[in-house]
Amino acid sequence: MIPTPVRITRGITGARWHLSVCDEHLANRLKSETGEDHILIRCLINRGLRSADEVSDFLAPRFDSHLYSPNLLRDMRTAVERLKSAIINREKIMIVTDFDVDGTTSSVILSQTLKLLGGGNLITCYIPDRFSEGYGLSTSIVERAAADGIKVILTADIGIKSHVEATLARRLGIDLIICDHHLPDGEDVPADAFAVLCPKGSSGVDYPNKHLAACGVSLKLADALLNGHPKHTAILESLAKLTAIGTVADMVDLSEKENRAIVAQGLRALSERSTNPGLRALLKFAQVNGAVTTYDIGFKIGPRINAAGRVAHASSVLALFDAQTDEEANDLAMKLDALNTERQQIQYQLVDKLKVIVESQREKLDSVLLFAGPESEGFHRGVVGIACSKIVEMTGRPTLICSINEQGMAHGSARSINGFHMVDALDTVSDILVKYGGHPMAAGFTLTENKIDEMRYRLNSYAAEVLEPGELGRSLTADAEIGINEVSVDLVRSLARLEPHGIGNPVPTFLIRNVPLKSVQILKEKHLKLILGNGARTVDALWWGASGHKDDLADTAAVALLCRPEINSWNGRETAQLKIIDLSVE
Ligand SMILES: [Mn+2]
């Protein structure tokens, strides 16, 4: 879907506006084949759907039938046999995972499953320390495991590039089983690994879902391990809770059928009272009540789990999910909550500091932004990645932030925009980098402090070659243009069937043009409330944090909006209102 610019090219916030182009022929066909509303159909087409079957699967995600067979992952049978024989022969198993949400939820999914199969005291879980050990499996972890008599190492969210470690493990008599989702096309898996479960590359050729998170791969392994277990279905439905948390937090594509089924089931199960004291305590401290949404995971649950690995150690997350009593769980959840508050403060201070710099350079901002500073001045290694995302959101420019330690080494994170492949960009400066890696949209890198200015200069020269000026800056895309008269409670209900939202399936946004503006008022000193329409039927529109735009709307007769319809419940009565994303005076 190629979004085209609309006649109004910029909103009042400075963002460029686009409207998705619709294949009318396809829309008419799907509408007649499915009987669904035409606005909903347009949103579904924008999310990549092309057939009536895809539409019905999307609108009704099913955990019992939308999951693929775990055996489509090459090596699944080998991995299952080895883990089962380890349990029968009482061999020690060590689970090693990443310190983020995807990694920690994988650790809990795998250890709970192996315990259900009788692995109880054979299992240890290990998470490398972000600061002292860094990402991934290392030779020292493998050596320590061998010294401890470990016979099987099971990794999740790490390991796919651990060629040296796999060879070492084999030499030390350890079987390495890897659950990962980071294999780039054309690259081989570690030849000495005992089994590799990965939906991508050579090991995932037969697996249809290329967007499985590592916790999703872990769920597939659990599915295969528990095959024949009397409570197989109930256990998997329950494990979907943690899988949904890891899947949403890892920002994989949620328009994919299998991911959608996992997340929908997980949200359903999370909304019921959990039997796990740790999960109950986590939801309580995160103030998540009632029907849990992907927003709750992304903004309340995920950050609390991540905070441990960002400012302390991720092992406290494992302890939380292992807690046997509410008292123990509450203590641990409170600790995570405090770590999250600490992380937030460090992050807010850094982002505020960078915002001031960005504002002061507004007219002559670099195409690629690169900031660096010492840890002692708030450039904390645990938050530079999140800070990058905030600056990208604000500026629409690829952003890199480095945290410089006392030894003069700069550890950086990078976040990008469409059209600028971050790893390709880092390739062009690889001669001055100590190490780097990542995805098109996000990467990490290390270099010495004295090379930072050169890196900034060279990345901007590269950007001048690959980026058009029009690709920089914030841009917003509407799913469709609708009329103000189409905004109704029924429309909001119909659009709710697109949930759960996330990467690949954003909350739908609409363009409404030429709407009469009846009045504007400020709410709670910060927000704007617009009353739209004329005559008998009016629609309220709320614009959060936009009180500064009130003067721009003086003497305005009509506006164009990029907005999202919502339901306002008041006094038992439901009405449709709009949430404004951006506005333009007509
Ligand atoms: Mn991951």
Image (tube, helix red, strand yellow):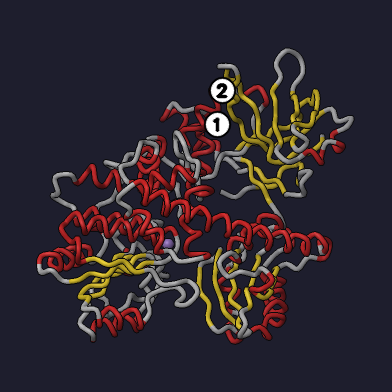
Mark 1 close to ligand 1, CB under 8 Å: no
290 relative to 561 in the view: left or right = left
Q: Residue at x 32, y 64 (%)?
A: 204
Judge by depth and name the residue closer to the eye, 481 or 341. Answer: 341
Q: Which amino acid does label 1 sit on?
A: Ile
Q: Where is residue 534 in the image (x, y as percent from the top left)?
A: 77, 18
Q: In this view, does 557 lie above or below 45?
A: above
The residue located at (56%, 23%) in the rendering is 489
Within the image, what quadrant is residue 390 found in?
bottom right
Observer able to see residue 241: no
* Ligand 1 closer than 8 Å to label 2 CB: no
Residue named by callout 2: 489
In this rendered view, identify the residue nearer to me: 315 or 11: 315
498 is higher (above) or lower (below) than 569: below
Front of the two marks 1 and 2: 2
Q: How crowded is mark 1: few (under 14 residues within 10 Å), some or many (20 or more)?
A: some
> Which residue is disc 1 drawn over?
39
Q: Residue at 61% across / 69% down in the picture?
A: 380
